[in-house]
Image: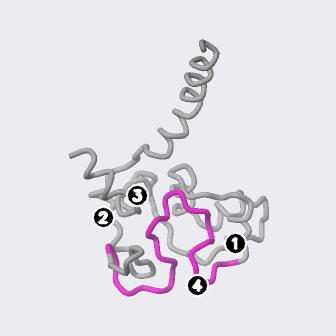
Amino acid sequence: MTKFWIACATAMAMSAPAYAEQHEMVGDAAAGEELFSQCQTCHVVVDDEGNTLAGRNARTGPNLYGVVGRTAGTVEDFRYSSAMEEAGEEGLVWTAETFVPYVQDPTGFLREYLDDPRARGKMSYRVRSEEDAQNLFAYLASLGPGMEEDAAATN
């Protein structure tokens, strides 16, 4: 029986960093909401029920609903660059650690991630500061699926 509890404790200890990383918030969502006005030229955030949570009717970039934790290049019916699709196939998932440097230099990020000096994405806009990129990430995370349940659970 003791071995069982040791195994349980070990499993919990090993899963804690993954849980913390998945739920850790970086940045200021309120500041990110203000910054998103620059993003809405190309992007929109529309939930699964069709409700527009942010942005206008932009179609140049993919819908950013659920971007946090999503594999890159996988929004249905959006035509990604071959480099973005390849990055997704190679395991690129949008977390704070990948989103922040990507939005600061999309082409440079893809070239480094894929180790391909010719890789290019479709996004040309660059977020100037790391803090702004973190704030945008926090804002998009706050709009993602499950955030309503998380907010209700903490109240």
Labels 1 & 2 near each other (Cβ < 8 A): no
Q: Secondary structure at mark 4?
A: loop
What amino acid type should be assigned to the residue bearing mark 1? Glu
Alpha carbon separation for disc pair 2 and 4? 26 Å
Which numbered mark, 1 or 2, is in the foreground of this view?
Answer: 1
Considering every residue shown, the one lying at the far front of the view is: 1
Q: Residue at x 59, y 66 (%)?
A: 106
Alpha carbon separation for disc pair 3 and 1? 22 Å
Q: Which residue is more in the foreground, 66 or 154? A: 154
Considering every residue shown, the one lying at the far left of the view is: 155
- Dot 3 or dot 4, earlier in sequence: 4
Q: Which residue is more in the foreground, 17 or 153? A: 153
Q: Identify the residue position indicated by label 4 in the image.
A: 77
Q: Which residue is more in the foreground, 18 or 103? A: 18
The quarter of the displayed image where residue 44 is located: bottom left
Q: Is residue 140 above or below residue 10?
A: below
- Dot 3 or dot 1, earlier in sequence: 1
Which numbered mark, 2 or 3, is in the foreground of this view?
Answer: 3
Alpha carbon separation for disc pair 2 and 3? 11 Å
Alpha carbon separation for disc pair 1 and 4? 13 Å
Identify the disc placed on residue 85.
Answer: 1
Q: Secondary structure at mark 1?
A: helix
Is residue 124 a member of the stretch shown in magenta?
Answer: no
Q: Identify the residue position indicated by label 3 in the image.
A: 141
State the image coordinates of residue 126 (x, y, percent, origin top left). 50, 67
Which numbered mark, 1 or 4, is in the foreground of this view?
Answer: 4
Q: Majority secondary structure of the magenta segment?
A: loop
